[in-house]
Amino acid sequence: MDDSNALMEQRKSKLAALRSKGLDPFRNKFVPTDKCDEARSGYVEGREVAVAGRVTAHRDMGKSMFIDVRDQSGRIQVYAQKNVLGEEQYDIFRHLDLADFIGVKGTMFTTKSGEISIKLSSFVILAKALRPPPEKWHGLSDTEIRYRQRYLDLMANPEVKGVFLKRSEIIREIRAFLHERGYVEVETPMMQAIPGGAAAQPFITHHNALGCNFYLRIALELYLKRLLVGGMDRVFEIGRNFRNEGLSRKHNPEFTMLEAYQAYGDYESMMELVQSMICRVAEKVLGTLKIEHKDAEGKVVKTIDLTPSWRRVRYKDLVREKAGADWFEITPEERRTRAVSLGAEIAVAYEDFEITGAVFEKLIEPTLIQPTFVTHLPRELVPLAKLSPDDPTTVEVFECCINGQEIAPAYTEQNDPIEQRERLEHQAGGEQQKLDEDFLIALEHGMPPAGGMGMGIDRLCMMLLGQESIRDVLLFPQLKPK
């Protein structure tokens, strides 16, 4: 029998011993009066409190004992005395295991070493942990275990739990910001007959009752625009999108997106919205507009400054800076050759605009650490946006890039149904079944001029919380099955 099995058998024996005394830890009830941090922050000598949590440390001193109890808010020390609990209860208390859940009642006091603690008067076991905690209780570091068994990661690494609590605050603050501006939160279908709003490979599922395939959505856009047609002037949705593509530091097959649409707005109004929202969230959740990213040793490796004013630069100008002032004057063949020489990965089937796109994505975007609005993208990249009046080869679009990746694209929405049909037909390559005809019919009923914006919540959290991998801001990232 290996050590882990032996430890499990010991814990099962303790559970059986408790039950033989008429004590079943899985049937007890307990109502805390305070969280652990509330008990500490609201310290008054002699105040009676009741807290509950997981046992994370114990120090046996014979006739007295200290344990640490931890809940979501933090930890607090508990001091137990044999002469207070009585011999039988004290013996049960001494045989608690690390990771058991316990409810304690007692009075607040400060130890000789100055630590705020609870002097125990009674306790109840609330759950018996049959498996021991990770060996490195105070710092589980195996990334495979951390991602596959996130609950162990949360148990062992309080700073990881802190990241996900902050993520929740970020999303809450985004909602509050949008509600204050008169946006209405809505929900649109995740299963769609035709996946649209982006160029991506969808996941396919089958509806048995209807006898047909559906696709998990790749974007929120087309249904939200239908609501603009219907007279809802400001709408947003925060939800999951699904793309049947690769895994990387920046990509997960399912990810969280915010999309917001504003009637009578444009890409300029969306620019103000994105900057104001990110700054508001940073100030409210983090208390600063200067975001430090640190390495494993805690050394600051970069600081992202969100204070105004954010840089605005045209896509073509950035490409010229990197690939040469004559980039858009040379032939497509010369562009391909130069892109390869610069280090961009160019597939044989790439069209000319995709070659320029590869130069931007691989060689330029990773260098945009400070907030940058990259504007006026090529029209081929965004068929749902309006053409730029001063350069019809581009569209009124921006990509907000921070921390070397795109955080939020936005644009002046195309509301001309004839123009929209032509551009979607071109994108579909003549395959009529790929057209969302219902969306085009909706546009023909009339959609007001509007600005629209999408924001990758996971990437926003990476930037704000100093995390360099998307897996570190997803509670349960997608992994290859064992």
Image (cartoon, helix red, strand yellow):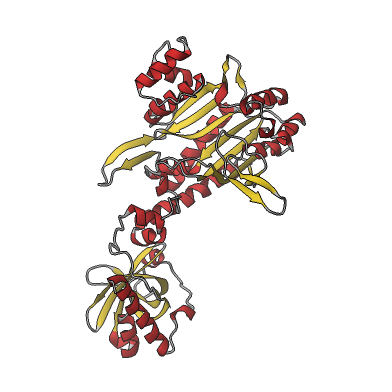
Residue at point 44% right, 89% down? 22
- Work out whether residue 360 or residue 276 is closer to the camera in this orientation and state it: 360
Let me know if residue 384 appears in the view.
Answer: no
The N terminus appears in which quarter of the rendering?
A: bottom left
Image vertical order of residue 276 relative to residue 341, above or below: below
x and y, in percent, of residue 161 in the image:
40, 56
Image vertical order of residue 448 relative to residue 230, above or below: above
- Work out whether residue 253 or residue 371 is closer to the camera in this orientation and state it: 253
Quadrant in the rendering for residue 84: bottom left
Image vertical order of residue 5 relative to residue 254, above or below: below
Quadrant in the rendering for residue 13: bottom left
Residue at point 39% right, 54% down? 147
Residue at point 66% right, 26% down? 430
The C terminus appears in which quarter of the rendering?
A: bottom left
x and y, in percent, of residue 98 in the image:
32, 72
Question: What number of labels is visible?
Answer: 0
Q: Residue furthest right?
A: 445
Quadrant in the rendering for residue 157: bottom left
Let me know if residue 266 appears in the view.
Answer: yes
x and y, in percent, of residue 355 in the image:
46, 22
